[in-house]
Amino acid sequence: MDFSINGSNPETARAGCVAVGVSSGGVLSAAASRVDRASKGRVASVLKGGDFDAKPGSVLMLYHLPGVTASRVLLVGCGKSGPLSAKDYRDIVRAAVRAVVEAGVTDAAFYLCELDLRDLSLQWAVHTAASVALETTYRFDRLKARKDRRAPALRRVLLGVSGGPSKTLDAALRSGVAVGEGVNLARELGNLPPNICTPGYLAQQAVALGRKHRLKVSVLGERQMKRLGMGALLSVARGSRQPPKLICIEHSGGRKGEEPIVLVGKGITFDTGGISLKPAAEMDEMKYDMSGAGSVLGTLKAVAQMKLPLNVVGVVPTTENMPGGNASRPGDIVESMSGQTIEILNTDAEGRLILCDALSYAERYRPAAVIDIATLTGACVIALGHVCSGLFANDDSLADELMAAGKASWDRAWRLPLWDDYQEQLKSNFADMANIGGRPAGSVTAACFLSRFAKNFKWAHLDIAGTAWRSGKEKGSTGRPVPLLTRFLMARAGW
């Protein structure tokens, strides 16, 4: 999809459709007023007729208005007159894009960036419009014999801004496109079935990403992991016929020798629970257990496209968690790369086992900070639902940065405690620690487990179990938290 910023007026824009905002009570945005004047009051006449209530997200398509170059004018409801929130704006843009797509329009001009936004800049509006447009037009039909006939035909998007393009707006547009494409990469990987998206496939995609965007990619196999002493990660892989991988991706956009930000993504490409087998209902959704890995690849794609002046490393431990004659058993004790021993009380608490070795591996990069991303615990879904991700950190300033990035990108997180009191639940009679701490505060004790492998650097943990995908009729990957991570990295890079 081709994006551009244009300073042309909506009534003269050369596009298949022009989208303008209208608030309740017939209050027209500046762009809608221009269309109304050019058409000699046709917009106001339609509104007086009561055919459009301007509720948030409502749309009405008008055809062949006199004095307007575009053959279609889309009225987009903005709700009550007044400043719009980030959520309102995103919903308005999404509704406009959906309406244009349903109409089969191939090129459209959206005059929505200059709506009255509450404490939000024009740059933010441009960035968000581009990313939301890409997310809204995403479809997963590559494995269907009959492709979706209603697949988006939209190929060209013009964002109308009265002053026209500028360096700052062009940068905002590029970053919005990069984030949207990064989100969609994460969604694509998540939506693939586990018989295709295996650890080997993820490694192939990382290599392809590296070739396209000049990223340094290395892939460690089982033998190399054994030499490194990654007994925790390898214990999870024992039941699978798919060989495990440790994928490392490096973006060297900062100064040579500058400490990198390391992103560690959980890559369980299918999680049966192992010997501690999960219930059959909805087990198909365990293909999404690699969403942390997908978000790392998506974020690195966005970072590379933006050419952020920052050093960023992605570390992805990836394997399946399967039952079998060689699978780990409850009661087994394994030694992690850090030398700490772990009693496995539940083989379905496998994500923390692959992450702990990856965190130890990340230490070799001498990181400025490490952030791990994982669909780690059902307990986090119970605590926070599907609205925000759980955030844990051993550094307050890092946590604050991530919270701010989540708010700015509308990919929010909420900080949960990481107090020493909870560490007591991980005690084991036979090893340095157990891999579970019982039912109480399950997401907290999981984070406490990981914190034992992150003592030598600033570290944060994002539990995305409730936000990485949707169930039901709208089942599919969300691509979160790519927006949060990219916004965090943009802020670190001074963007």
Image (spheres, rainbow, N blue to C red):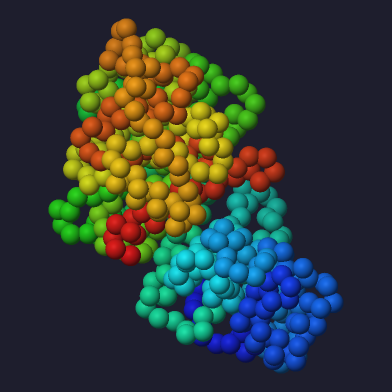
Q: Position of residue 48 (x, y in %)?
A: 81, 78
**Residue occupying image coordinates x 30% and y 42%:** 396
Which residue is situated farthest in the right direction here? 49
Quadrant of residue 429 in the image?
Answer: top left
Which residue is situated farthest in the left direction here? 257
Q: Position of residue 222 (x, y in %)?
A: 31, 29
Vertical comparison of 358 with 59: above or below? above
Vertical comparison of 482 with 40: above or below? above
Q: Position of residue 304 (x, y in %)?
A: 34, 60
Q: How many marks do you count on the picture?
A: 0
Observer-nearest of 347 and 451: 451
**Residue occupying image coordinates x 68% and y 65%:** 79
Q: Position of residue 395 (x, y in %)?
A: 28, 40
Observer-nearest of 191 and 476: 476
**Residue occupying image coordinates x 57% and y 58%:** 87
Is 143 left or right of 170, judged from the image as shown?
right
**Residue occupying image coordinates x 60% and y 69%:** 82
Quadrant containing the C terminus is: bottom left
- Residue 372 can be seen, yes or no: yes
Vertical comparison of 471 with 165: above or below? above
Observer-nearest of 235 and 58: 58
Is 310 left or right of 319, judged from the image as shown?
left
Quadrant of residue 74 in the image?
Answer: bottom right
- Residue 242 can be seen, yes or no: no
Is 67 left or right of 374, judged from the image as shown?
right
Observer-nearest of 351 and 495: 495
